[in-house]
Image (cartoon, helix red, strand yellow):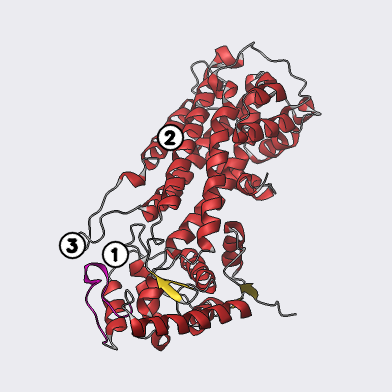
Amino acid sequence: MAVEPVELSGAGLTPLEAVALGQRRTAVRLSDDARKRMSESAAVVAEVARRRPVYGRTTGVGANRDVLTADPEHGARLLGSHSTTGTTSYPRDVVRLGLLIRVNQLAAGGSGLAPEVADAIVALLNDDVLPDLHRGGAIGTGDLGPLAELGLVLGNVIDGTSALPLLSSNAVTLAECCLAYVEAATLINVVPLVGALSHVALRGNAEVYDVRVQEARPQPGQVRVARRMRGLLDDLPIPPARVQDPFGLRAFAQVLGPAVDHVEALGNSLRIDINASAENPLVAGDTVLHNGNWHAMPIALALDSLRLSLHSVATLSTSRVANLVDSEYTGLSQFLASGAAASSGVMMIEYVAHDALAAVRSSAQPATLGTATLSRGAEHHASFAPQAAVLTAQLLDALREVLASELVTAVRAIRLAGLSPDDLAPAAVGPWLADALAALPDDLTDRSLREDLEIARGLLTQWGDRQVEHPAESG
């Protein structure tokens, strides 16, 4: 039975839903209400343009904003010149999601573009005939280059007056942001699982997650992380080894909590922008308003803040690895070694973790610190949201390596301690330990642990897929 296309109406689309639609290649269509809005706004902008200048429609762009033109080839020349990009293609999943987001934005009705433009993009999506769009030239003030390439693919549906409105969007950047958001929310959701296994291996003190501790300082993300850790560790029948644990355990909720808050903030900003009529000029009622809604600063700042918070999450993970290889904290052999004297055990895991942490640190640098003065001074600021999105994807990959290092180390420590999932019952962390023990090799002799790390990375992905709750889209 054929599945009805999902309607895009310019409202109510969440980043998670948008990513799912793109990944499943779900057929979409423009809603009837959106079609009506687009037709009405196209009529309005045409009427206004007969009476006064409209940026990009009857004028040039950038520093040419005061140059009037009635040239019917103006749009074609604009697309041709603005399709100047770099040579690296966007991944197909980014292109697909970017086109879907642009249709949803157009459906809000503020662009002045006719519904036939949205229909043409929908046809590309539904036929899976995706244009080859390239990176380069987007700095958080509109994805001018790749959207100009899209305009050239759309052909005659874009005329001399509709080129600039098509470009007035950060849709491709928002696609990368939505993908990074879902990856970050998923990865953040498995950090407590890894942390709980380290807690078991280090015989941590769970007082830090007590409700009364959280009520004394009710930071939202911290409270949610502590609640999650109580759900994993409550009734754990292993007495704590210390009155007060090292920071990796004691400050777990306080460090992961801000990342939960920041991924939620990113999700909220993305939800607004993928449904926004962030057009310049904006058709509003019976008039046209020139504005700066193309500026992606809210998104760029949300990405920068998230990366900075995740850097601390990675740092604390490496501190737990340091504790796990130290016999003073575990009561086990140095470096969790087994066999002959002077065996190295997981010594190299700590090096791998810090190599990955260095990559996290490099990627955490705020993109919004950049500056730009362009088009003869007409445009002298940029958010660099596209660069922030790329850095976020890089950071998340490195963070996964850090967490995989901790997971391999914690599970090895639990094996050496002779603990089984049954020994953790009735605590809910037990089944997760069973998963890890089944997946990771039980050979404790000195050998390359590369395969173990690869298995751990895959296990993190599996665990993320099994989590229903995304911290950024839940209460």
Is residue 462 visible from the viewing direction of this image?
A: yes
Magenta highlight range = 57-70
Report the amino acid beneath label 1. Answer: Gly
CB-based contact (under 8 Å), mark 1 and mark 2? no
Is residue 332 visible from the viewing direction of this image?
A: no
Q: Secondary structure at mark 1?
A: loop
For residue 73, the mark is: none
How crowded pointer 2 is (Cα within 10 Å; few <14, some 14-19, many 20+) is rated as many
- Relative side of 378 to 436, left or right: left
Q: For the point 39% across and 53% down, which residue is it?
A: 385
Tag 1 residue: 86
Report the amino acid beneath label 2. Answer: Leu
Tag 2 residue: 357
Q: Is 350 in front, or is 398?
A: 398
Give the answer, above or below, for where 222 lies relative to 174.
Answer: above
Work out whether mark 1 precedes mark 3 in sequence or the reverse, and give the earlier one.
Answer: 1
Work out whether mark 1 precedes mark 2 in sequence or the reverse, and give the earlier one.
Answer: 1
Q: Secondary structure at mark 3?
A: loop
Quarter placement of the C terminus: top right
Where residue 419 sits in the image (x, y, percent)? 72, 24
Where residue 275 sits in the image (x, y, percent)? 54, 64
Tag 3 residue: 376
Nearer the camera: disc 2 or disc 3 = 3
